[in-house]
Image (cartoon, grey):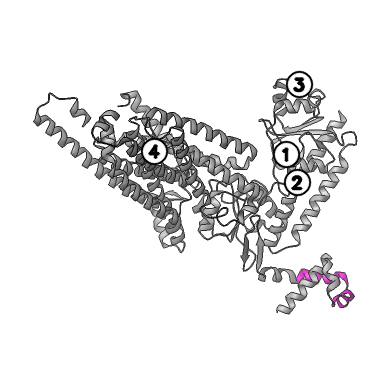
Amino acid sequence: MAHRFKLIRILLRAVHGTRLLSHISLFSLFSRISRISLITLVGLAQPGWASSMAVVVIDDLGIEHRFESPPQRIITLLPSLTESLAILGGESRIVGVDRYSNWPASLAGLPRLGGLEDALIEAIAKLQPDVVLASTSARSLERLQALGFKVVRLRSDTHADIQRTLWILSQLLGTPHEGPRVWAQLQQQMAAASQRVPASLRGQRVYFEVDGGPYAAGRGSFIGETLWALGMDNIVPLSFGPFPKLNPEFVVRAQPDVVMGEASLQTAMNARPGWASIPALVKQQVCGFEAAHYEIMIRPGPRLGEAAAIMAECLISLARQ
Amino acid sequence: MMATLHKPQADNADVDADVDARAQARQRLTRWLLALLLVFALAGLATGTQGFSPAALWAELQSDQAWLILGQIRAPRTLGAALIGALLGLGGALAQGLFRNPLADPYLLGAAAGAGLAMVLVLSGATAWGITLSLNPWAWPGPMSLVLAAFWGAIAGVALTLTLAQGALHTPRLLLAGVVVAVLLGALSDLVTVASPQALRGRQAFMLGTTSFLGWPAVALLAAGTAALTALALRYARVLDALTLGEDSATSLGVALPRMRLVLVALLAAATALAVAHAGLVAFVGLVAPHLVRRHAPGAHAWLLGASTAMGAALLLAADVLARAIIPPQELPVGVITAVLGGSYLFVLLRRQGLQ
């Protein structure tokens, strides 16, 4: 049996073209087999291989979690993690979610288990999850760990975090190639969206407001990274951190060319002293996203490509004005 | 006692009857408190994701998850809530006796602000440098790290207040120093949350107070702390009695005031720190528990301290059960319940007669 697993693992690597290939002496033998039959072989072998394999993942706190087989009962306490699981094909294994998870819509019937800071410990315990997915720190997580549950803690602040999360989750699900595939797909979506951004707007400086504080999405946030991928610049430099609270004066001085945020944004901004002179507001270069779209944009999850497409869509409409 | 002093003309029979009535009132309250504690503790065991339901408790006992759900989750959180309430009740009675002010509460001397700041620092550190910190066995991610941080933060807050007031001798100075330290440390917490907004979530939960996450180790620690602190406080109850006559009279009665006050402040700080570290800023229990005791069965401080401890336990236990029972399977933050209940009680009391 062990021999068979080794063989299949080598086959898997062959399909995904890792550099290990060159070191495998048997490669010449395999190369005779046609590519199609290889894929069929893997396709047939994979389910059995996946469910009988022990899974080991290391979360973002550096803690190693060992599972005898890929977990079948999963609870997520963050919307972005729920979405990532669903995209990776683990939707049917989710047995409970936090109160903010609302995508995909098919999860609506699942038990709601509160938020990170007020997670319903008893309700979670009753569901007997194999693993609980959450962000890096909250008191509820310590309690769950003390009760003997496995809590995988994942950070999601940047694109790199999202990529790593997808990778870790796909390992957890026992389908390790899904993560890189979904990430590649996301990048394709972002590249496609970037292609559509009108040339006249490329390189223009955006102010993305996440809260009326005013808090901005800086160049270093995942939103800023998406804008950067679209070829747009940001008035908030990397050094300010991901979501800095700005002096309103800074925004007026920075004279953004385009302003983005929630739909109700424009009226609120025009009412702020001195803001009416901001070029983006004078020329009505404003992207006010409706609630459903805005939600996609502010979640660091697998709908990143969709968010980029919505931004591109708005930029196209701005260029037409 | 105080009331009898106001009636020097009353003859001995009257005074005796009065003393008897008060002793009876105290006995009655003791019986009530014990009964309430028992009832609420049982109600706590019977309140879960289905709300308050003894039938569900029976079903739960039959299931194979009984030990996990009842033994590991419901029992410790119910007991823990009672113990935290006890600590807050004790702290409130100590503070009100020490400052001779019915509006004093356990959070007065900077303990709350200190614990809050420590909590926010750990949370922001964990998000900013989570991986580096996790290499340190003394810090993150120890299972008690947030609790430990909050405890030492509370102690540090009170220590800072004492330094600023140059000891515990002058009441107004001590109170003022407490206010200054609370404002200062609170502002520092705000500053940290501006730099790392992720800590906001934890801070809000801390401000609201919660008894959801108490396990057996926490309960053991709380029980030991409550027992030790109550015993110590009862030993110094006579000092508080002497203080009710005024600081000068207390000194003339032979109380070594500077040292005694320092001891009492230390007890207050320890009780508050222990409670706050485990449950956050549960509002009003510390303020209301001594009032309820004084109103229904006034007495000397030995009685007041002990009864306030039991009253605090009963109050927070009831609030914890309510928090779970009102909108199951969701849970309300227990601090909101105590604030609403305690606030309305004081509101009614003030409307009716003004505070004694």
Instruction: Give how far across and how far down residue A284 sits, in percent.
Output: 80, 26
Residue B105 x/y as whole percent: 39, 34
Q: Nearer the viewer, mark 4 or mark 2?
A: 4
Label 1, label 2: how far apart the Cα atoms are: 11 Å
Query: Principal SS element in the magenta part?
Result: helix
Distance CA(mark 4)–CA(mark 3): 50 Å
Secondary structure under the numbered disc 2 in the rendered image: helix
- What is the magenta range? A26-44
Nearer to us of marks 3 and 2 is 3
Picture quadrant where residue A259 is located: top right
Please name the amino acid that badge 2 sits on.
Leu
Left or right: A33 as drawn, with respect to A73: right
Q: Which mark is residue A304?
A: 2
Residue at image position (59%, 51%) is A110
Asked if marks 1 and 3 touch (Cβ < 8 Å), the reply is: no
Q: What residue lies at 72% left-to-right and 25% top-to-bottom? A: A249
Query: Marks 3 and 2: CB-CB under 8 Å?
Result: no
Q: Residue type at mark 4?
A: Val
Q: Amino acid at mark 1?
A: His
Q: Residues within 10 Å of mark 3 (few under 14, many from 20)?
A: some
Q: Nearer the viewer, residue B338 or B217?
A: B217
Residue at which label 4 appears: B285
- Among the two numbered marks 1 and 2 on one chain, the one whose residue lies closer to the N terminus: 1
Q: Which circle's residue, 3 or 2, is located before the other in the chain?
A: 3
- Quarter of the image that includes the C terminus of chain A: top right
Query: Seen in the image, is B147 located left or right of residue A241?
Result: left
- Read off the residue under disc 3: A276
Q: Per the image, is B82 magenta?
A: no
For residue A89, above or below residue A286: below
The answer to whether tags 4 and 2 share a subunit is: no
* SS category of the residue bearing label 4: helix
